[in-house]
Amino acid sequence: MRLGRAEIAAVDARPARVVMNEPFAIAGGSSSALETVFARVRLADGTAGYGEASPFPAFNGETAAAAERQILRAGRRWLGRDAAAWRARLTELEDWLPKRGGAARAALGTALLDAWTRRAGLPLRTLFGGASDRVVSDVTVTLGDAKAADGAARRIRALGVRTVKIKVGSTPREDAARVAAVVKAHPRAVLTLDANQGYGPSHSLALVRLLRARGITPVLFEQPAEADDLDGLAAFHEKSGVPVAADESLRSRADALKLARTGAAQVLNIKLMKMGVLEAWDCGLIARAAGLGVMVGGMVETPLSMGAAAHLAAGLGGVEFVDLDTPLWLAKNPTRGIGFGRGGVYDLSSVKAGIGVVPRIWS
């Protein structure tokens, strides 16, 4: 490990637009192009680390343009500060950036940790606990009709991916037909559903009952009620017996503690873009302490932030659900390095330092 000269010397941000090969549609909206911002943190000894801000406006209204401004503003305040004191630096981001600044916190936080672990000669997963060096992701079937779901399921099966996440939120009957089409095309698939608040608990329960009448039972249902309807989440689980994952309901450590205390969810879906690295990491530890399951997911992102999330999942270990598939929607990969592999595998074993991904604009 090189000693000294760990001061932050420069912080840069560069926006990028990546065309998608098909729209990524959820109950709250859709996106046909990824508007992202790449961040670079350079240390005094020349070591550089990289991060990404890829907010999904349909999720919380956050935009890439706002994230770029936040990255540059907070980055100026970091100049001359010690990157080795990385927890203090990540805490500063939470103090400086607004709550609707999760993507900027994620970009700066991952860039800082990428730089520090590159300098230390450690893969990022080691910092998070080093439990394993690989994780296996699902692949999503986005909103659409039954024919589109059939085609998506066939492509997922051809990729060798077994866990399929199906976006729902139109009508229970339409969604039941779509799920049945997936099962017909990929009979051995393990199914999870994600309503993204598009359903209330009664509609979510109706969908599960329609599926059970067809002999289909999902292993997990994400956000089967609105974000603040914790009673609805709990009631859905009690009546359906299907475990609930909190996504939109999980926005902070306080939310994680409340979800654990109330028993409203059985799994917490942790995303770097929602809250930044430090708070996401802490939410994973809260879930563990409370005996809850952990999902590591993301918005629509490139292999850079998806790779960072894979390191988090691998480092924590025992993450039951991994949802890091959105690079498959990008028409062109704007990065080089590790990524989504055959069977949904993120193989991190070759990464000797940092994340193992670099934006092409800086490579």
Image: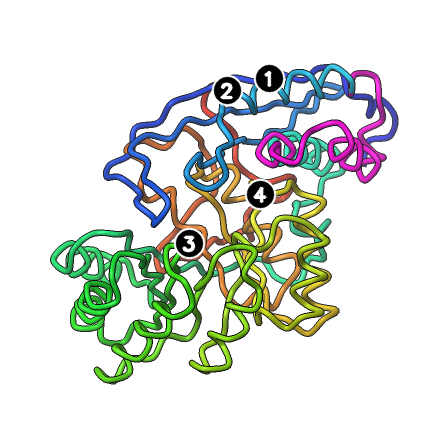
- Identify residue type, mark 4: Lys
Residue at 56% x, 20% y is 68
| Residue 291 image position (x, y, % from top left) | 68, 74
Tell me the crowding category of disc 3: few under 14, some 14 to 19, or many 20 or more residues within 10 angstroms, Cα based.
many
| Residue 195 image position (x, y, % from top left) | 38, 58
Which residue bears the numbered disc 2? 65
Which residue bears the numbered disc 4? 274
Alpha carbons under labels 2 and 1: distance apart: 7 Å
| Residue 188 image position (x, y, % from top left) | 27, 76
SS class of the residue under badge 4?
A: helix
Tell me the crowding category of disc 2: few under 14, some 14 to 19, or many 20 or more residues within 10 angstroms, Cα based.
some
Dot placed on the residue nearer the N-terminal end, 4 or 1: 1
Tell me the crowding category of disc 1: few under 14, some 14 to 19, or many 20 or more residues within 10 angstroms, Cα based.
few
In front: label 3 or label 1: 3
Which residue bears the numbered disc 1? 69
Report whether 212 appears left or right of 37: left
Alpha carbons under labels 4 and 1: distance apart: 17 Å
**Residue 44 is at least partly visible in this image:** no
Indicate whether 212 appears above or below 234: below
Magenta highlight on residue 276: no
Which residue bears the numbered disc 3? 196
Alpha carbons under labels 4 and 3: distance apart: 14 Å
- Identify residue type, mark 1: Arg
Extent of the magenta region: 78-105
